[in-house]
C-alpha cells in the first residue's frame, strides 16, 4: 500500500506559488521549492509531477485566487465601471504584504530560456486570452453605445494590457499601491473611458 503523504498539498502548493511569484519559473530552483514547501524531491514529484507541472498548478491557483476579480470586473454594467474595477483590481493584486509584488505570469516569463519555452508559451497564451476577453468587453461597449463607434477595440485592449503589464513591472521594482493607483487614475482620465468627470472607485 502507498504511504500517506506527510504534508498538506494545498499548503505546499501555496508555498510553491510564492516562490515562483518572487523568482520566476527558471529562477526558482528545486532546492528553493522543496525548502519552502517543506517536502523532499521525491514527495514533490509524487504529488505534483516535475517542476513544469508544479508551475502550471501554481499558475492555476494564482489565476483562481489572485486574479479572481477579473471576471466580475468585466461584468460591470458600464465600460467605465469595468475598466475602473479591472485596473484597481490589478493594482491591488500586484501590491500588498501577503505575497510577492508584481504579477506571477509577468515575473515568470521575463527570463525564459529555450529550455523553458513551453512555460513561456503557456504564459503568452494566458495573456492573449486575457486580452481577448478585454477586447470582447470593449466591443460589447461599442455595440451598446458605451464606447464611440469609431473606437478601435483592438488598439484599446492592447493599450490597457500594456498599462497592466507596466504596473506589474513597476510593482516588482518597488512601486507601492498608491503609485499604481495614480497610474490607474491617469488612465481613467482618457476620453475613451469617461474622462475626468467620473469619480474613481474609493479605496480603503
Image (cartoon, grey):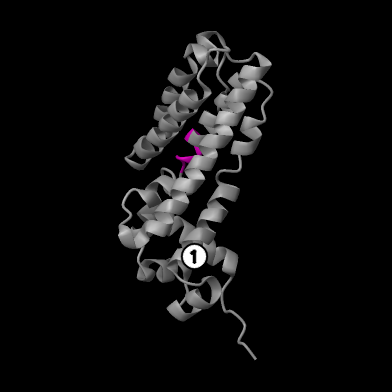
**Residue at 48% in and 57% down:** 17
Number of disc labels: 1
Extent of the magenta region: 91-96
Mark 1 surroundings within 10 Å by alpha-carbon count, few (fewer than 14), some (14 through 19), many (20 or more): many
Q: Which residue is mark 1?
A: 54
Vertical side of 107 occupied by 117: above or below:
below
- Local secondary structure at mark 1: helix
In the rendered image, is residue 204 in sight?
no
Closer-to-camera residue (5/112)? 112
Q: Position of residue 178 (x, y in %)?
A: 43, 28
At x 33%, y 48%, the residue is 110
User: Where is the N terminus found, in terms of image quarters?
Assistant: bottom right
- Give percent across and percent down for residue 158: 45, 29
Q: Using the image as rendered, state which of residue 55 and residue 41 is in the foreground.
A: 55
Residue 186 is inside the magenta segment:
no
Where 115 falls versus 103 (above or below)?
A: below
Residue furthest bottom in the image: 1
Residue occupying the far top of the picture: 197
Look at 62% across and 83% down and name the residue there: 4
Assign the C terminus to one quadrant of the image: top right
* In the depicted structure, whether residue 44 falls above or below residue 98: below
Residue 19: % across, % down: 42, 58
Q: Tell me, yes or no, whether the highlighted magenta stretch contains residue 92.
A: yes
State whether residue 42 appears in this view: yes
Residue 52: where, in percent of width, then height? 45, 64
Left or right for 78, reference 46: right
Amino acid at each position: 500500500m502507498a504511504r500517506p503523504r506527510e504534508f498538506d498539498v494545498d499548503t505546499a502548493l501555496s508555498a510553491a506559488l510564492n516562490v515562483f511569484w518572487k523568482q520566476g519559473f527558471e529562477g526558482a530552483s528545486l532546492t528553493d521549492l522543496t525548502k519552502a514547501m517543506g517536502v523532499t524531491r521525491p514527495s514533490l514529484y509524487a504529488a505534483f509531477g516535475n517542476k513544469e507541472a508544479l508551475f502550471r498548478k501554481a499558475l492555476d491557483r494564482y489565476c483562481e485566487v489572485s486574479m479572481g476579480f477579473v471576471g466580475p470586473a468585466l461584468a460591470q454594467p458600464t465600460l467605465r465601471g469595468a475598466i475602473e474595477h479591472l485596473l484597481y483590481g490589478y493594482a491591488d493584486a500586484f501590491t500588498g504584504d501577503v505575497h510577492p509584488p508584481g504579477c506571477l505570469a509577468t515575473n515568470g516569463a521575463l527570463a525564459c530560456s529555450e529550455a523553458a519555452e513551453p512555460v513561456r508559451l503557456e504564459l503568452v497564451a494566458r495573456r492573449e486570452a486575457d486580452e481577448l476577453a478585454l477586447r470582447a468587453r470593449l466591443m460589447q461597449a461599442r455595440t451598446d453605445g458605451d464606447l464611440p463607434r469609431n473606437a478601435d477595440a483592438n488598439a484599446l485592449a492592447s493599450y490597457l494590457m500594456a498599462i497592466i503589464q507596466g504596473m506589474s513591472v513597476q510593482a516588482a521594482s518597488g512601486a507601492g499601491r498608491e503609485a499604481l493607483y495614480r497610474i490607474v487614475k491617469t488612465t481613467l482620465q482618457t476620453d475613451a473611458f469617461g474622462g475626468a468627470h467620473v469619480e474613481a472607485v474609493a479605496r480603503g
